[in-house]
Image (cartoon, rainbow, N blue to C red):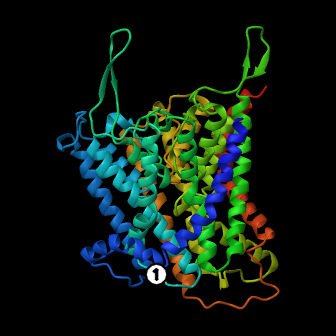
Amino acid sequence: MSLFAIAVTLLLSLLLARPTGLYIAQAFNYERTGLDRWFGWLEQPFYAVAGIGREHQSWKQYALAAVLSNSVMILLVYLIFRFQGVLPLNPGGMASMEPTLAFNTAISFMTNTDLQHYSGESGLSYLSQMMAVVFMMFTAPASALAVAIAFIRGLSGKPLGNFFVDLIRGITRILLPVSFVLALVFVALGVPQTLEPTAIATTLEGAKQEIARGPVASFLSIKELGNNGGGFFGVNSAHPFENPGGISNLLQVLMMLLLGTSLPFTYGKMVGNKKQGRVLFVSMAMMLIVFLGISLASENAGNPIINSLGIQHQQGSMEGKEARFGAAQSALYSVVTTASESGAVNTMHDTLTPVGGLIAIVNMMLNTVFGGVGAGFINVLMYAMIAVFLSGLMVGRTPEFLGKKIEGKEMKLIAITLIIHPLLVLFPTAVALFAHADTISNPGFHGLTQALYEFTSSAANNGSGFEGLADATPFWNISTGIVMFLGRYFPIITMLAVAGSLATKKSVQQTAGTFRTDNALFGAVFLGAVLIVGALTFFPALALGPIAEYLTLKP
């Protein structure tokens, strides 16, 4: 039954991907369309007040607008966190955030990471949840989606567009209408939506029980749709108020996959090569299904245990999992949330089997298994260009992508982008293991995995964690904050530079010797580039963490 439910979930995601992708392409079309009539009345006041025109920006202007506007938002939200103790809408009397924690949290939500070093319901006031966190849950994915669209325009030889126009369109035409309807659905399913303070109940034994609540449904809808992932409650979507049952769990998985699975079709439509978009979609879907199969097999089998008679056998893993969902739905959720850059959890990833934890980490290290809203899809296209470049080297031809020659300048920028991700993961992990091992709750291989997972999640802007780690300290707050910021904005700048360079190049005529990028052969080369480059980069660290842990438990 569990496998049937998972198959239905994946089928629904497949059916939603193409129409959503075509709609996104239409939403960002600068030519007048029917969508202007539906959303123009909402957008025009923002353009008028901010003085935003539709003039196109160069890649430098686009990147500067994205980074500076996001940085200003980080500062404003940091101030809200620092003064939430004296601001209104704080019925629970939440204290103002400590400086390093406010620094980490502001960067976390603005970079679409949503890594939480505080416990949801006991860390933020209602004002902070609504005016700071939910605000960034809209602007962060809209910023990433805008950059991805600009990158696609550059690849197709068109002007990159205007960041502020794309930011507003991403919110008004995609995120806001869908999350509004979704919030109403979650309310109907039993998710709270109230500004009333914590409820006090009397148990059967006569004790007083405090039941946290708040504006959860509106938080939850954009959390999943925008691949944000941060939880209103400390245990995230394992909490019955944040994930009441099977239907809400199904909707959350679908929403986490929706935009990431749609972008290949958006890309195919915008560049005029729908077959290439389908090839990328199928390639990423194959990775997702293989990783999901491995995780399901591992979590259903569990770890080997010794019974009272000294006989060794396997037992399904339910440690750290919600009984309402079981091992299968927990494995599905863990694979989808790390593949889609969401970071939401309905089970504690620290309790996954070594292989289940390995799959979650690998998803974030590769950061190309659909990859969420915008930023992950830019990584997909980066690997596609790497695949083209490697193929060109093998046959002795200058590589071409969408009719544009990929030369030394572009490959240098791609190489820099490629290397920054492992540096942001491996170097701080080594520092943490050397100087801050006291914050790691598990000894041996699992403890190494805890630290490795934290920085991998930060660099990939995912936000999920191995929660046994004592991460609410100045070291972890500052180090992961820096990693999240660089992991987000460094690739945005370098890849926009690649797009800007390709946009100015003349298209070359395809010949019989041109390497086609819209067939099964290219899909195979693309998968090989992703897996080989990822394995060469991260395998030694994985061998010391989850792989070594698995081998010590193996009969």
Asked whether 403 or 252 is in front, the reply is: 252
Q: How many marks?
A: 1
Side (left or right) of 145 relative to 250:
left
Looking at the rendering, which quadrant does residue 249 occupy?
A: top right
> Could you tell me residue 384's position as x and y percent?
67, 69
Please tell me whether mark 1 sits on a helix, a strand or a loop. Answer: loop
Q: For residue 514, what is the image quadrant? A: bottom right
Height in image: 415 above or below 238?
below
Q: Is residue 114 visible?
A: no
- Residue 170 higher or lower than 52, as above or below: above
Task: State the residue at coordinates (24%, 46%).
Answer: 82
In this rendering, position of residue 520 left or right of residue 2: right
Tell me the amino acid under the disc marked 1. Tyr
Q: Which residue is mark 1?
A: 30
387 left or right, relative to 145: right
Q: Quadrant of residue 267?
A: bottom right
Q: Is residue 46 visible?
A: yes
